[in-house]
Amino acid sequence: MLWKVKLKGGWPVVDVNSNGYTFGFAFVACVLASLLLAGANLSLKDLQDRNVKTDKLRSVLVAAGFGTSTTPAQEVEEWFKEDIKVKVLETSTGLAAKDLSADEYDPKKHPNYTLIYECIKADQECSILPVEGKGLWGKMRGYVAVGNDNNSILGLCFYDHIETPGLGAEITEPWFMENFKDNKKILKVEGDYSEANFKGVTLLKGVKASDKPKEQQAYYVDGISGATLTCNGVTEVMTTFLYENYGKYLSNRQRGIK
């Protein structure tokens, strides 16, 4: 028997001082607590999923300079109702998918496609593109905003990473993101989207972007001290990844092909 029972006044009474009672009580309490936590998690799952989605969409706004990390959820929703359109892009062609809607898109089922965002608001037209690269400890995911000239970088915002706090994790700090809003370019010669002409933006180590010749400063930003691998990952995102995944899209957009 799990716990001892003794008679008191002719009635059976559980011996609360026995080891069996202590272990049995603890077991029942743990089971009940687990059930309560599981129930709470299930009941909050929809809310958690909505919050995650809102945070990602908020990062889209931050990358384009339309919002901040504290932009209210209602304002985020309004942007996407009125001014920002979602498009499924076939990365190999740089064209919109013909038979795949944003609601049907699943990154696991459709690895050759991705969701991109286009702002259609007057005088603020731009493309906001999802990017990812390898950091020190794992994947870094974010968005890059490219201006209506399909050459100027408007901003970069990472929303998911596991980089070291105080070092690589600085990629989410305002001072770092501001580096990408200072008239940065991705093409050596505007309008030419060939691999040889696609320069992108490189993070520097041991030297500042302002130390570069003026005509080259548009292609460089200051790196993060003590975070070499993280910086290498961001450089990969802003050069090779951008070209391989969006070079054709930006070229098509420049020529008016959608």
Image: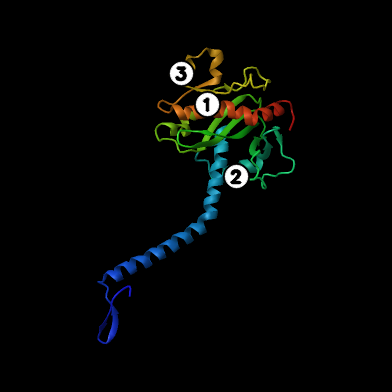
Q: In the rendering, at what x and y percent does residue 59 appear?
A: 54, 38
Choose mark 3 or mark 2, whichever is in front. Answer: 3
Q: Are marks 1 and 2 in contact (CB under 8 Å)?
A: no
Q: In the image, is 35 to the left or to the right of 55?
A: left
Q: Which badge, 1 or 2, comes first in the chain's sequence?
A: 2
Three-letter code, disc 2? Glu
Choose mark 3 or mark 1, whichever is in front. Answer: 1
User: Residue beneath label 2, please?
Assistant: 77
Question: Is 36 placed above or below 256 here?
Answer: below
User: For this rendering, which residue is in front, 244 or 124?
Assistant: 244
C-alpha span from label 3 to label 1: 15 Å
Quadrant position of the N terminus in the picture: bottom left
Residue drawn at (52%, 51%) of the image: 48
In the rendered image, the residue lying farthest to the bottom is: 10
User: Residue beneath label 3, please?
Assistant: 208
User: Residue beneath label 1, please?
Assistant: 235
Q: In the image, is 249 to the left or to the right of 3?
A: right
Three-letter code, disc 3? Lys
Question: Is 44 placed above or below 119 here?
Answer: below
Three-letter code, disc 1? Thr
Circle 1 packing at 10 Å, graded few (<14), some (14-19), many (20+), is many
Choose mark 1 or mark 2, whichever is in front. Answer: 1
Quadrant position of the C terminus in the picture: top right
Q: Which badge, 3 or 2, comes first in the chain's sequence?
A: 2
Q: Are marks 3 and 1 in contact (CB under 8 Å)?
A: no
Circle 2 packing at 10 Å, graded few (<14), some (14-19), many (20+), is some
